[in-house]
Image: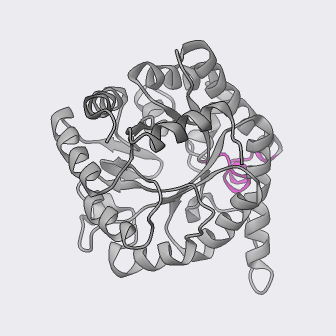
Amino acid sequence: MQGSPGFEHLRSLRDSGRIVVIDGAMGTELQARGVPMDEHAWCGVANLRAPDLVREIHEDHIRAGADVVIANTYMSGLGPMQRAGLGDRFEEGNLRAVRAARAAIDGTAVGPVALAGSVSVTPWAAPESGHGSGERAQIRDGYARQVDVLARAGVDLIALEMVVDTRLGQPAVEAALAGGLPVWLGLSMQVAGADPKASESLPPIEPDAREIARACLRDELDAVNIMHTDIHDVADGIEMARELWTGPLGVYPHHGIWKQPDWTFEDVPVQQLVELAQDWVRLGATMLGGCCGLRTHHVAALRELADSRGSA
């Protein structure tokens, strides 16, 4: 199936053995630049109240060397928007997010850049649903509504993010694959016994995350990502995922402490990140980026690493 120019460029980079660079965090970057985070829709409200800043952050990531930018739609699903009292602006919020990202690409990129539409699969962002026999269909339909809006808005692929259980993960995968665009599965996890202040109750890699991955993996997926996983836990996550998945594997981790709705930043020296990323590549990662707490200068360092390696 022929994809968009941005996605075809992404695929060509991977096929040639080059490392793909994914952008850095959006939500925590908005917070760092002074945007209040919403208790219910976190950074999703910024698409309506600070769209110029959303675009500027995308531009900064592109200038830093990102091959892929992820639209600010992580908390723009119907559930979060309804709980924030903005259910009637659900579609508008997603459209504005995609427009901001596309404007950044069109105005800043010197070559093709792929645009991913983020769909959050955490309980905090779940679509509203009842219980009982119809729950799975309601969840799937809720995710399908956002996938449809993102596809119509013009994203190149769908990035499912923070898949931390099968109750939400399986119907989200079904909805995303039915949308017709390439789909990334983003798994979040922690090493057993990790600091509970920073873990956000992420599933332990063994056995929980392994079982979640096994239940959600489909041959039709374009890639699997270990994302929103602490930088120190990523290597173990890659080793687990590589036993189950032989296709493209990406990494965009976090570092810091979460206390809803705000992020506490902890320093990540560039050289430390690069040394860890070299190990991730050795273990099989072919895409590198950053999630919460990782910023534009981290993206630039990953770009430099990717360029220094050339093709495998």
Looking at the picture, how far across and down is residue 143, in whole percent?
A: 72, 59
Q: In this view, does 183 lie to the left or right of 261?
A: right
The image quarter containing residue 8 is top right
Q: Nearer the viewer, residue 175 or 217?
A: 217
Looking at the picture, how far across and down is residue 277, in whole percent?
A: 25, 45
Q: Does the magenta stretch include residue 92?
A: no
The segment highlighted magenta reads 75-87
Q: Is residue 60 left or right of residue 264?
A: right
Q: Which residue is drawn at 47% across and 23% down?
A: 62
Q: Which of 201 and 146 is in front in this view?
A: 146
Residue 186 seen: yes
As drawn, 136 above or below 177: below
Q: Which residue is drawn at 43% across and 39% down?
A: 16
Q: Nearer the viewer, residue 147 or 181?
A: 181
Looking at the picture, how far across and down is residue 110, in whole percent?
A: 52, 15
Q: Is residue 254 left or right of residue 49?
A: left
